[in-house]
Amino acid sequence: MVVAESLQTSLFGTTPRWNKERFKALRAIVDRIPDAQQRAWVRARIKNETSFRERLIELASFPNQLAVELLVGDAEVWAKRVVDARNGLAHNGADPQTSGDIFELTEVTLFLAAPALMQEIGLSGEVQLEALRR
């Protein structure tokens, strides 16, 4: 999962969620929250970057789409499963009942790096598919 996040950032950089003016305006609204503790809590959660799920979907949209479909199926569903698994592991620790799911998601996500890298170096969709079939 870290591979996907790192690869996405390497390929596309960080994408702000809002333009600078809009984010400044949002921060100004948050700064008007009277309670300092609540204000700090909200401020810590408002980031001007796309979510992990959005970055995964962006990564999945990059290589040959048939290759992506063969690997992950529906990219939106896959991204949600990856995020849920990562958050569950990070916040709740390993659950023996979901360990297989985490292993499968990690493996599939790692395999997605191959066609993404092939796309980046200019290899065709056909080459990406052939590599997956082998």
Image: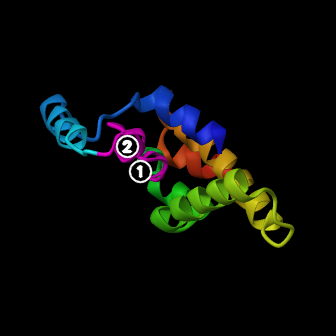
Mark 2 → mark 1, Cα distance in angstroms:
6 Å
Do tag 2 and tag 1 residues touch (Cβ < 8 Å)? yes
Depth order, front residue of 84/24: 24
Residue type highlighted by circle 2: Thr
**Label of residue 4 in the image:** none
The magenta stretch is 35-57
Q: Is residue 97 located in the magenta-colored stretch of the structure?
A: no
Residue 122 placement (x, y as % from top left): 46, 30
Extreme residue in the front direction? 35
Residue at the image point whose x is 44% and y is 45% from the top: 55
Q: Quadrant of residue 30?
A: top left
**Label of residue 54 in the image:** 1
> Is residue 118 something that shows in the picture?
no
Residue 109 placement (x, y as % from top left): 64, 50
Residue at the image point whose x is 49% and y is 26% from the top: 10
Depth order, front residue of 127/71: 71
Secondary structure of residue under mark 1 = helix
Residue type highlighted by circle 1: Glu
Residue 35 lies, with reference to residue 93, above or below; the image says above
Residue at the image point whose x is 25% and y is 45% from the top: 34
Q: Quadrant of residue 43?
A: top left
> Is residue 32 something that shows in the picture?
yes
Depth order, front residue of 42/102: 42
Depth order, front residue of 34/22: 34
Q: Answer with left or right where residue 26 lies relative to residue 37.
A: left
Instruction: Look at the image and tell me in which quarter the N terminus lies.
Output: top right
Residue labelled with disc 2: 50
